Image (cartoon, rainbow, N blue to C red):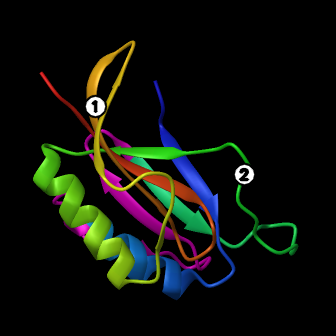
Amino acid sequence: MFSHIMIGADDIEKAKSFYDAVLGTMGVAPGFIDPNGRCFYITDSGVFAISKPINDEPASHGNGSTIGFAAADSATADAWHAAGLANGGTTCEDPPGVREGANGKLYLAYLRDPAGNKVCALHRMG
């Protein structure tokens, strides 16, 4: 359904360090910075990108927005969370763990990235 997701950050290098670490736990190669200063992570399932806002205003996170990254298992979600905390992220919501809802059991780990964007590692449990 999605071709790409792009978020804003004022410090691209700081954001890149964070996302290199958390996405690296999921087997994603480090991002690359294009000639316009944007950072891209390209996989078979889509593109995740970071950019300074093109209107020259400060970057801001979307209140109520969450970007979820698929984790292969709960151990990967835990590694993702730990890597994020070690690279400038802050924990938010409940600690990583199992949540039950209308879609069954999910293993979730939430963080705020260095720019304040809310991100999540999600493993759908059988």
Residue 14 in magenta? no
Q: Secondary structure at mark 2?
A: loop
Q: Look at 70% across and 73% down and name the residue there.
A: 52
Q: Look at 82% across and 75% down and name the residue there.
A: 58
Determine whether 70 is above or below 76 in the image.
above
Mark 2 or 1: in front is 1
Question: Magenta stretch?
Answer: 24-46
Question: Relative to 112, is 60 on the left or the right?
Answer: right
- Report the amino acid beneath label 2: Gly
The chief SS type of the magenta part is loop
Q: What residue would you read off at disc 1?
A: 106
Residue 112 position within the rendered picture, expressed as x and y whole percent measured from the top left: 53, 65
Residue 17 position within the rendered picture, expressed as x and y whole percent measured from the top left: 40, 83
Question: Relative to 118, is 126 on the left or the right?
Answer: left
Q: Look at 76% across and 65% down and name the residue there.
A: 60
Whether residue 30 is visible, yes or no, is: no
Determine whether 58 is above or below 87 in the image.
above
